[in-house]
Image (cartoon, helix red, strand yellow):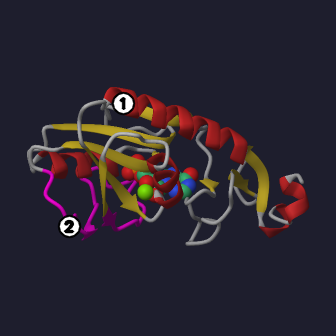
Amino acid sequence: MSHEDEGWLEGGIREVLIRPEEIAARVQELGRQISLDYAGRELVMIGVLKGVLFFMADLLRCVTVPVEVDFLAVSSYSHKNDRQGGVRLLKDLEISIEGRHVLFVEDMVDTGLTLNYLLRNLQARQPASLEVCAFLNKSKNRLMEIPLKYRGFDVPDRFVVGYGLDYREQYRNLPFIGLLKGDRL
Ligand code: IMP
Ligand code: MG
């Protein structure tokens, strides 16, 4: 059955950008690479709620080294014109990451402001190592240089939804990455 048959497109999606099969294959590759890179070490995977929900869940099941999981939540208002940051921590970690190998997992890196703020915050807690894994990367609007060790897909400068990513809290449940009908061409 194609996704067109499932009625998603009627619900405001213009086009499927990344299909579920492509997502699954890429996540498996990332999981394999992470498992190789962290062989013999214990990992702490930290995700940013809520967009990272599906990616993190799928990625975790492809990682074969011992791994602990924790989450952060940040305020998600637009801050494209606020280069000072404008990021606020709504939920902090529950576990200590001091001396631990931390892999920070994000749904999307756009300007990089959110990630830059969070990486500085985490680095101050003195982890043994700190790397970043982003599911999607939009490099066109990047304002801060971000060391992205792992990335799922590069996407164009368009607003995308699905697989955890939302537009006004909707569309997170789509099994694919799609473009909204209202998005400019
Ligand atoms: P940054 O600080 O500009 O890198 O913001 C990244 C955050 O903005 C991501 O974690 C997403 O939550 C959100 N975001 C950026 N682009 C999109 C998009 O195309 N769809 C949905 N959320 C997005
Ligand atoms: Mg996010």
Quarter assignment of residue 144: top left
Identified by mark 2, the residue type is Glu
Dot label at residue 9: none
Find the distance from the CA under tag 1 to the CA under tag 2. Answer: 24 Å
Say which element carries label 1. loop
Q: Quadrant of the C terminus?
A: top right
Q: Position of residue 91 (x, y in %)?
A: 27, 70
Which SS does the magenta portion mostly show? Answer: loop
Q: Which residue is at the front of the view, 9 or 69?
A: 69
Could you classify mark 2 by the number of other residues whose Cα lies within 10 Å: few (under 14), some (14-19), or many (20 or more)?
few
Note whether 81 is above or below 141 in the view shown.
below
Q: Position of residue 142 (x, y in %)?
A: 41, 38
Note whether 99 is above or below 54 in the view shown.
above
On the image, numbered disc 2 is attached to which residue? Answer: 94
Quarter assignment of residue 3: bottom right
Residue displayed at 40% across by 65% down: 76
Q: Is residue 49 left or right of residue 89?
A: right
Sequence order check, earlier mark of 1 and 2: 2
- Dot 2 beta carbon under 8 Å from ligand 2: no
Dot label at residue 149: 1
Quarter assignment of residue 182: bottom right
Q: Position of residue 105 (x, y in %)?
A: 38, 48
From the viewer's perspective, is the residue at label 1 or at label 2 nearer? 2
Q: Position of residue 95 (x, y in %)?
A: 18, 62
Note whether 56 is above or below 173 in the view shown.
above
Q: Is residue 115 left or right of residue 123?
A: right
Q: Quadrant of the N terminus?
A: bottom right
Q: Which residue is at the front of the view, 154 or 62?
A: 62
Identified by mark 1, the residue type is Lys
Magenta residue check for 88: yes
Could you classify mark 1 by the number of other residues whose Cα lies within 10 Å: few (under 14), some (14-19), or many (20 or more)?
few
Query: Which stretch did the figure color magenta?
Result: 72-97
